[in-house]
Amino acid sequence: MRQFLKGNDAVVRGAIAAGCKAYFGYPITPASEIAEQASLLIPQSGGIFVPAESEIGAIQMLFGAAAAGVRGMTASSGPGISLMQEGISYMAGASLPGVIVDIMRAGPGLGNLGVEQGDYHLVVRGGGHGCYRTPVFAPNSVQEMCDLTIHAFEVADRYRNPVYVLADGALGQMMEPVEVPVLTSSEPEKSWAVIGNAATRGNLITSIYLEHEKQEVLITDLEKKYEEMEKRELLWQEIQTEDAELLIVAYGISSRIARAAVEVARAEGVRVGLFRPISLYPFPGARLRKLAGKACSVMVLELSSGQLIEDVRLSLGGITPVQLLRRTGGMMPTTEDVAQAIKKMEKECVGNYA
């Protein structure tokens, strides 16, 4: 069914299509519509909505639902995601699936309600304690807000791991046509869950391993799981990269601005392409390195002081120069700003070759 939806609304439609049966949350702008729509629609689909007393409570409720084998989710923005970090670490340590949606706003601290991408380090690098990782998927359209939420549930159950959908306030609040699917898949059997019957009475959900050797075994097992993610869960998009001498790397709303700027620069004869990582962890670094090896220079466009750029530089290992174009504080660059930066980068490359 095709509907005209806000990005936040599309998240809830995607969750229902994925078979989500429990939502736990605390409202925060610019993510509040997710909780609002979840309170209306998830009970209608046979699930439950629980308004938590805080974000700390919400993530612990998600832990409990996951331990009982229920597909569940929560959503928040930067300050709330910060409060959830302990619980997310517990979920990762106990190998529990669940979906967390972060609709980023400007920070640090209370910041403001403007568009920013400053939660990249917090989410992609794992803001909680201990040795764990979480898959992270970054939409750049309202349709993808729906589709990647569905995908997040599938990945969470595949690996028994919490999974993020990382978006920004612009995507959460903008409206676009969305093809909303019906229930996409049946939930897998979870023989490991604790559901109050004789068959599961012996199951133990825990992240406590007081014997050091057993804790090390857990970490080793988690690392094997992450290695499998890095092989199977890579997602990216390439725009006009076949002959690109210049390359822009951007995700989320920034990638839409970058794509428009690429079209402007191409119309003026500049051979520039766009690489959009959709999976931020695992990061598609090998493919980016291959493309960058043919380019004169790489520009990272992001709405932060420079966080994505660290993964880009790690992936490239110095084979191609990398520069940063950024805005912060809730500000976004215009298409013309980015197009001008591309043309400046081209002149610098021509000068280097001269």
Image (spheres, grey):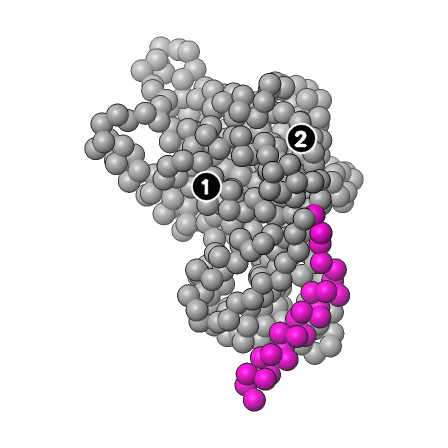
Residue at the spot of label 2: 28
User: Which residue appears at 60% of the width and 38% of the height?
Assistant: 109
Residue at the spot of label 1: 126
The first of marks 1 and 2 along the sequence is: 2
Please state the horizontal and vertical placement of residue 225, each as a whole percent of the image.
36, 41
Q: Amino acid at mark 2?
A: Ile
Q: Main secondary structure of the magenta part?
A: helix
Please state the horizontal and vertical placement of residue 35, each as a whole percent of the image.
67, 27
Residue 343 drawn in magenta: yes
Q: Quadrant of residue 54?
A: top right
Please state the horizontal and vertical placement of residue 111, each as a whole percent of the image.
66, 40
User: Which residue appears at 74% of the width and 40% of the height?
Assistant: 173
Answer above or below: position of 83 versus 239.
above
User: What whole-number distance in Å separates the C-alpha atoms at marks 1 and 2?
Assistant: 21 Å
Element carrying mark 2: loop
Q: Are marks 1 and 2 in contact (CB under 8 Å)?
A: no
Q: Quadrant of the C terminus?
A: bottom right
Residues shaded magenta: 330-354
Look at the image and tell me whether residue 177 can be seen.
no
